[in-house]
Amino acid sequence: MLSAELLTWLPAYLALGIAGGFAAGLLGIGGGMLYVPLLTWLFEAQGFASSTLLHLALGTSLTTIVFTSISSARTHHAKGNVDWSIVRGITPGILVGGVIGGLLAKHLSTTTLALIFAAFVTYSAVQMFLNAKPKPSRSLPGTAGLIGVGATISTLSQLVGAGGGFLSVPFMTWCNVNMHRAVGTSAAIGLPIAIVGTVAFFFSGRTVTGLPPGSLGFIYLPALLGVLVPSVLMAPVGARLASRLPVATLKRVFAGFLFVLALKMLHSAVVA
């Protein structure tokens, strides 16, 4: 059953993996902002129950991000663009927020999750588009502050199926972290977010009835297998390009990418 389903939708999943992996490396976002809306539409085309469409997209996206984050972060680390002190400081909050967000998502409707996705992606895009200059004296918060930020980013990331870059990159640049370093660090931060989210969506979906064959909780294996390999291969390509682009160009790409996806998801929420 898995093989037949995967073969039928393989071209679409492969294309999504290529685009998502490239975006993960280029923008440090884990690819989730692309995976979630497109997986939702693909699942809808396959006739999945509307009540679990977005939940399956979120869980599958976060599972894919586990692997793309590793691939992307390794490339960014090799170029010296990962601040591991930030990663270590923010991870405890990420673990707490991941559990909260993953369990909360189970009890929210598809429309509510879509509206949350659109709202926070739009916010992130506006922040990047305006390119507000941080105060020269502003710096990253201390340990308690980083834990709180990590919990917030992780909770919201579970609700939109992303690696956290939509908030972590603007946050770090607001605190005067260099854009290239913020993108690289965000790729590394996406790994613990994705791991805890994958576990939460697996367990929260185990008791849900009406999921399509091939589902492990809210993780849909045919989509995961189709997206995974090309996404992991393309993440380093995007990461290498990110290190060559000027900061202003990278911010415009990031903002434009988020604007388009927010509009698409908002449209889906309104017509649902």
Image: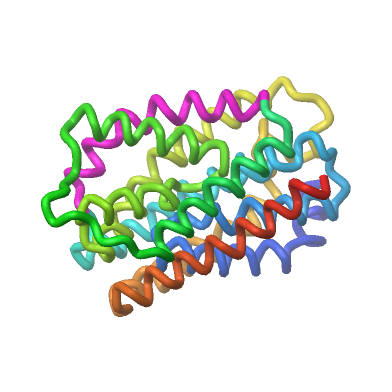
The answer to if 141 sits in the magenta stretch is: no
Say above or below: 91 vs 74.
above
Q: Is residue 18 left or right of residue 74?
A: right
The answer to if 88 sits in the magenta stretch is: yes
Q: Position of residue 158 (x, y in %)?
A: 53, 37
Foreground of the two, 216 or 4 = 216
Can see residue 61?
yes
The residue positioned 17% from the left and 44% from the top of the image is 85
User: Which of the 4 image quarters holds residue 247?
Assistant: bottom left
Q: Is residue 52 left or right of residue 235?
A: right
Magenta segment boundaries in residue numbering: 83-107
Say above or below: 203 vs 72.
above
Which quadrant holds the C terminus?
top right
Q: Position of residue 49 (x, y in %)?
A: 84, 38
The residue positioned 73% from the left and 39% from the top of the image is 111
Q: Position of residue 135 (x, y in %)?
A: 18, 54
Residue at the limit of the structure toward the right, as seen here: 47
